Image (tube, rainbow, N blue to C red):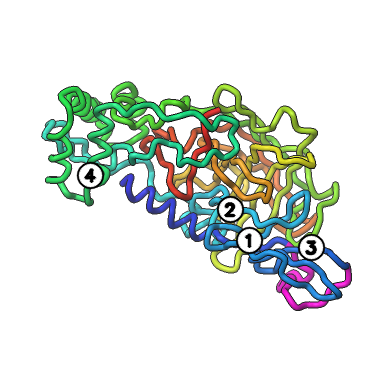
Amino acid sequence: MRKRLFFVLVVITALFLISNCTSDDPEDGYAAGESCSTEAQEVCSGDGSSILVCQTGIFVVKKNCNINFGEYCRLLATGPSCKDTGDTGNTGNTGDTGNTGDTGNTGNTGNTGNTGDTGDTGNTGNTGDTGNTGNTGNTGNTGNTGNTGDTGDTAPEKGECEKIMDCMELCAEGATACMQTCYDNGSVAGKADYDAFWACDSTNNCQGNYLCNWENCQEKAKLCGLGGDTRYSVPYGTATLNGSFTYIVTNETSLSSNMYITKFIEGTFGTAGHLIDPTAAGTFAYAQWIVPTTGSNFLALSQEYTDAILKNPMPYLVIDEADIKTGSHNVGLTATDTVQIFVAETDVDGNITCRHAFGVGTINISSINTSAGAAGNVSLTGTVQLYSPAAAPIYGGDITSASMVACQPK
């Protein structure tokens, strides 16, 4: 199931490619070749695929966003930018993917955290698990420093049980002979830790469920790599949400004071990480209704800085159109979650380079109306725990991938 989880994360992220940023016409938006009146004015194309600039009365393409890698034109404080959705938030839903980030499953991975494995403890090397209980072999850092301020940190040496798990992860689904070989080739200590972990799983009737294993077999799970990269604490931090937006941005070319609030989320992560850079001059947050060229619509809440120079991190929240309603919402990456929250690093162009954390918990939306402009609103409160993608034991440990790059530890 872990292999499926990673596959779904990648596929969902690939879907969240485009969001509409600016438009003169609510239906069509701006397009290259159309007339314009303000020389040097920069806007997003109606389909979010490029930044346009007004030259001698005609909009021309200034930059094409690389939609194949999740970029879309988005309105920032400094003007239009090809911003990487990164899966902006939703691993499959809203916030991610050009399909509102929602692949039809609310952006969720579709994995409830249960591997579906019975956790056979017969210590034959084939625990009954299909190899998805281990770590993917990814150390948690994809090599992208993500402007984290800690580029020299290296992942610790893997444990013997984790090596067995990593080997099994490479086996084909259901290839018991391959998994048996991985077990047989493991060290004496590795096999002992492996057997102890699955014995604990069986005793607690976890049946391979990651959350159950973490709650009941935490120390044994760590030895087998299910805690992820040990440089990151678990959980990694906490975020508190409290915001009331009274305007929904749609096709505006710039933001005026009535369109944004100061902040909607704050908190800490790691030993020195803050959701709001303590050196920042100020922050602003806005709610944006995004209509991608493919997929369903979604609402994105973004929090950025008023500083003229690059500041990080950038927290954001996404919720798919199908999940928009008042009341309690689950936050996370599974099929039962309707909201996703991420804390990301961006470069000078607004592209997401890595993610410090994602949120897990519940929030309450007391009011929400996605009508454009001052007719729309959204108010929400709540507290969620933060986990690094490199250390997410509730989902099996290290869930990093090409589309889910973990920032270096803070």
**Farthest residue in the front direction?**
152
Cα gap from disc 1 to disc 4, whole angstroms: 38 Å
Q: Residue at x 41, y 41 (%)?
A: 399
Q: Is residue 107 toward the left or the right of residue 55 in the image? A: left
Q: Residue at x 51, y 36 (%)?
A: 360
- Vertical placement of 368 versus 65: above or below? above
Residue 42's disc is 3
Extent of the magenta region: 22-38
- Residue at label 4? 130
- Closer to the N terminus: mark 3 or mark 2? 3
Contact (Cβ within 8 Å) of mark 2 with mark 4: no
Callout 1 amino acid = Ser
Contact (Cβ within 8 Å) of mark 3 with mark 1: no
Camera sees residue 113:
yes
Which secondary structure, mark 4? loop
Q: Residue at x 78, y 48 (%)?
A: 246
Callout 2 amino acid = Thr
- Vertical placement of 362 versus 56: above or below? above
- Vertical placement of 266 versus 78: above or below? above
Task: Give the foreground label among 3 and 1.
Answer: 3
Instruction: Between residue 229 and residue 97, name the one nearer to us.
Output: 229
Residue 19's disc is 1
Callout 4 amino acid = Thr
- Closer to the N terminus: mark 1 or mark 4? 1
Cα gap from disc 2 to disc 4, whole angstroms: 32 Å
Contact (Cβ within 8 Å) of mark 2 with mark 1: yes
- Residue at label 2? 85
Q: Is residue 197 toward the left or the right of residue 176 in the image? A: right
Which secondary structure, mark 3? strand
